[in-house]
Amino acid sequence: NRWLNENAYRFTVIAPPWIDIVSNGPTTASEWDAPSVSLLSISNGAKVMPRVRVRDVDSLMKVVETDIVKKAVARGVDGVFVDASECDINKMPPLVSWLTRFNDQLQANKIGLVLQLPTGIEKLSSSINVVKMLPGVILVGDNLESFNLPSDRAMPVVYVPPSDINQTL
């Protein structure tokens, strides 16, 4: 991908698609090209944090956190990016409960958690409580000013445009 090659030096985190949690359960979005992602990461000093996209919180409740953590450890990733932007904000209590258990296990394995909250929740004053319940979490999004987080715990989202030339990244 030409755009990626020209802009890779700008990234501090690479989050290839990994697992999608949908209404019929978890599906592997892709088994990303580990050597290519690793090379890109090493050459640009970026961390690899594969994306787990949560589209259905009820299905997420059936996912055993340990299973994802074991896979993350086996892959040697720096962290896991949980994209909860499409989640129903009315399902926040079970989502936060699952994330708390998941974060505890990630931290025990010295793996970080990066989180994108459900769309719209960033603007609610109560959303700061989510951050307090997830020690060390890095938030991703476009409206994070109200969290008053240090710059190393908040980052914008940058999407790489799709390319027909290189489908392996």
Image (cartoon, rainbow, N blue to C red):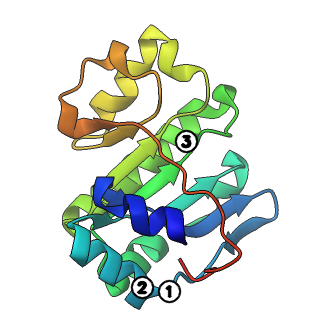
Q: Which circle's residue, 1 or 3, is located before the other in the chain?
A: 1
Q: Which residue has dot 3 on it?
A: 95
Residue located 46% across and 21% down the image: 143
In percent of width and height, residue 61 lies at 62, 54
Amino acid on which disc 2 is placed: Ser
Characterize the local packing of mark 1: few (<14), some (14-19) or many (20 or more) Cα atoms within 10 angstroms.
few
Amino acid on which disc 1 is placed: Asp
Residue 67 versus residue 141 in the image, above or below: below
Q: Which residue has dot 1 on it?
A: 33
Residue located 17% across and 28% down the image: 150
Q: Which residue has dot 2 on it?
A: 36
Report if the CB atoms under discs 2 and 1 are less than 8 Å apart: yes
Of circles 2 and 3, the one toward us is 2
Which type of secondary structure does the marked residue at label 2 adopt?
Answer: helix
Which type of secondary structure does the marked residue at label 3 adopt?
Answer: helix
- 110 vs 41, nearest the viewer: 41
